[in-house]
Image: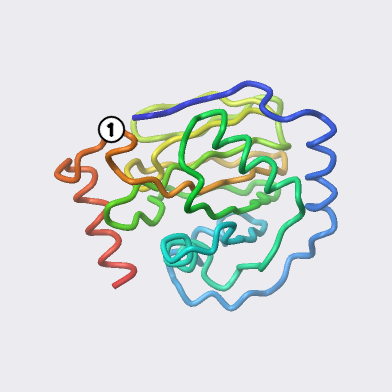
Amino acid sequence: MNFKKKIDFITESEKSEIMNFVHSYKKQDFYITNDHIKEINMATNGWSVLCDLTKTIVSEEVSKFQGDATQIEEVPEIFHLLHNRISETLMISSDNVFFQCIYLGENGEVKRHYDAGKPGYITYKCNVFIDGPDVDFVYVGDSIKEINKLDLYCFEANLYKHWMDKSESPRVHLSYGFLIPCGDLGWHEDHPRIRLSNRIWRHYIK
């Protein structure tokens, strides 16, 4: 697993700018047709919005499933700046990237799930913990990872089931999906986790 964490990845002023976006956004009643996405969204007790940042064939195909009807066309510049900072910090390709802002309400949780993973690509999720309890935890596969506000944390979201428990505190996370060729992250396409991801893709997408 290529799990990475960068402490204090954003500044307090950047957090404030992001929270202005969160506070200005009104939860809407989206008509979500995908039962998988609907179940995950309901459990958050909140909302999420998705934007395809690169608008390529690859990012469009994956983000269409990942966000279903919750997509928006554009986001404030701060989210593009963070997209570029993540790419430069981790030295990963920014050719195909989508973005989600996720608000988990009081007692909201992220249910166990795999992200969509287009065959030939890793959905490398690079998330930023914006607001919530001082210390939180994300479960990835058999591991539990401690995260703190302002941290960046990254992992292969189509290869490892992941989730977050309920919290009394509302939480805000940014989630960038970098769609990276398998070999660039050291994965062989015959690996059992890659084959499982491909089967999940065929089941839900095709």
Q: Position of residue 170 (x, y in %)?
A: 72, 44
**Disc 1 on helix, strand or loop?**
loop
Q: Which residue is mark 1?
A: 186
Classify the position of the N terminus by image quarter. top left
Q: Residue at (45%, 34%) from the top-left corner?
A: 139
**Residue 153 drawn above or below residue 118:** above
> Would residue 175 be found to the left or right of residue 118 on screen?
right
Q: Position of residue 87 (x, y in %)?
A: 54, 37
Q: In the image shown, does 89 or 147 lie closer to the viewer?
A: 89
Q: Position of residue 3 (x, y in %)?
A: 43, 28
In which quarter of the view is residue 152 placed? Answer: top right
Q: Residue at (63%, 35%) from the top-left corner?
A: 85
Q: In the image shown, does 74 or 166 lie closer to the viewer?
A: 74
> Would residue 89 be found to the left or right of residue 192 on screen?
right
User: Local crowd at mark 1 within 10 Å, few (<14), some, or many (≥20)?
Assistant: few
In which quarter of the view is residue 41 placed? Answer: bottom right
> Would residue 105 be found to the left or right of residue 115 on screen?
right
Q: Residue at (63%, 74%) from the top-left corner?
A: 30
Classify the position of the C terminus by image quarter. bottom left
In the rendered structure, which amino acid carries the disc numbered 1?
Gly
In which quarter of the view is residue 74 placed? Answer: bottom right
